[in-house]
Amino acid sequence: MVETAGRSTNEKYNRARANNSRYRWMILIGLVVSAILEIMDTSMLNVALPQMAGSLDTTMTDIAWVSTAYLLANVVVLPMTAWLSQRFGRKNYLVASILIFTISRALCATSPSLGFIILWRLIQGAAGAALISTSQAVLLEIFPSEQQGLVQALFFIGLVVAPAVAPLIGGEIVDNYNWQMAFYIHIPVALISLYLVGAHYADTSTPRSRGAAGKLDVAGIAFLAIGLGSLQYVLEEGQRNDWFNDATILNFTILAALGIIALIIWELSPANKFPVVNLRVYGNRSLAAAVVISFAIGIGMYGVQFAFAVFLQGVLGFTSLKSGLALIPMGIGAMLSLMILAVITTKVDVKLQIVTGLAISGIGSWMLGFNTLSTGIENTWFPSILVGFGVSGSILPVTYAAFAALRPSEIADGAAQMGLGRQLGGSLGIALLDTFIVHMTAISRSTMVEHVNGGNPLFTHTWAGVAAYLVPHSYSWAESQRVALGIISGEISLQSALEGYNIGFQGVALVFFFCILLVPLLKAHKQVSEPAKPTR
């Protein structure tokens, strides 16, 4: 009886492997599409938030929870994706995630109030966690090692290009339709992904392998939700609420620290037989180094994209459309890099690829730190291409090196940790860079204002000249002086903001350069491990 059951399990496993080998390119397309939808989600929706606030008669502070809720749920569920895919079967979990992601998106568009939208966004964020980490685990399972360079490059196109083009698409939708369309437009594409994955991917799990996941780790999930959920809240709301000067931010920071410490202790405890997050995978030095590098790259990548978009509109006065066009070169640079990496990933030393990519990213970001108020869109193209090229040229080989260092049974856990590192790095990068730019802008303005006094002949000459220009335009001399002072004050604000952003971009460049120091911690591997057979 046992022998018959084992033979049946082997036959089912072999049929699933043969099926996945036959349809692997169709499955790849479906997974790439789902990953693009997940990455584009928040970036594209951010453009629609002002219109949503007006339509729902709410404030921008409250409407920001549409994005915050998604990220909170996403970052909490992301570390659990390996356990969830084992417990329910990789196909069942992935298909269910795509389906729930799609349905909750449609429900957001039909919700009558902000409260309902936030609820569906929480559900959508939880479902979206699987669309990258679990998808990567599937690709490592169904493609042979010699094709992993090409496959991972194709998959990463969505991860690095989507954030660059999402604001442009979102702006076009909001300008020509309404905010509901920003939710609806993804649904037909998501259904294509659902069909490609659901109809062509065969699960290789067995009842025994699913049972090996064990019972639900309630304590681990609770600590995870408290720790990472609180941390994500602090990163999202900190700058808006003046960081630790706000009691709520301070309390959530304490909760985050306590929750994360408790999570680490419990998940590593011998008493916890079935941890929901396998932190023991960090015993692999190469993976630990890869997660740290991925975290740092996330700080730079998302920080630059966020700051650059805000800089273009807030300082240079670009329209949403023009800002979207200015971000496209980052996507072009990323695609060029990935096309090259698809060929050389398995042929050129991985560490050399990472160092080169980080150096190029740093150079591009440093060049963005020399903008002026007369900078045109064409002046930003070359440094933007360098940033996109370098980010892709570093993050893909880092991921490849991480997976190559893992045993087949650790791949899903490694993918979850890499995704979490990149996600938290992005949130931290945006929060820190936003705060840093605001701080540097204030310092710059304070320095400039010190020279606005009667003892400075340059100021008095400029003030008098502007006032004299205004007098013939229906202003009295007293009024023209007041208006001239306001004009000078506005110019000082722009100049100080410009200096703040320039220093911010150069600060990000230093982050990229610092990452180079971490590369020696990686172990070089020539190929990714072959997929594991199920536990029987």
Image: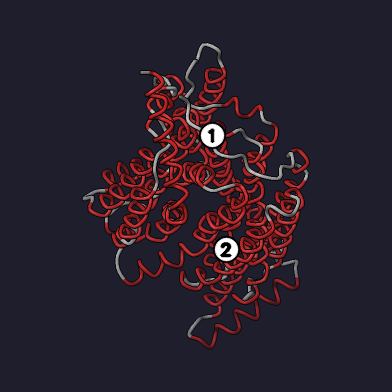
**Three-letter code, disc 1:** Ala
Residue 210 horizontal/vertical position (percent): 40, 27
Name the residue carrying label 2. Answer: 311
Give the number of marks. Answer: 2
Residue at image point 61% right, 79% down: 466
Q: Secondary structure at mark 2?
A: helix
Q: Is residue 406 above or below residue 504?
A: above
**Label 2 crowd (10 A; few <14 / some 14-19 / many >=20):** some
Is 110 on the left or on the right of 451, as rendered? left
Image quarter of residue 11? top left
Quarter the C terminus occupies: top left
Q: Is residue 485 above or below residue 533?
A: below
Outermost residue on the bottom side: it is: 472
| For the residues bearing labels 1 and 2, Cβ distance under 8 angstroms | no
Is 250 on the left or on the right of 292, as rendered? left
**Three-letter code, disc 2:** Phe
* Residue 432 in view, yes or no: yes
Q: Which of the two residues, 461 or 366, is positioned nearer the viewer here?
A: 366
Q: Is residue 157 above or below residue 64?
A: below
Tell me the distance, in whole angstroms, between the alpha carbons under discs 1 and 2. Answer: 48 Å
Q: Secondary structure at mark 1?
A: loop
Name the residue carrying label 1. Answer: 532
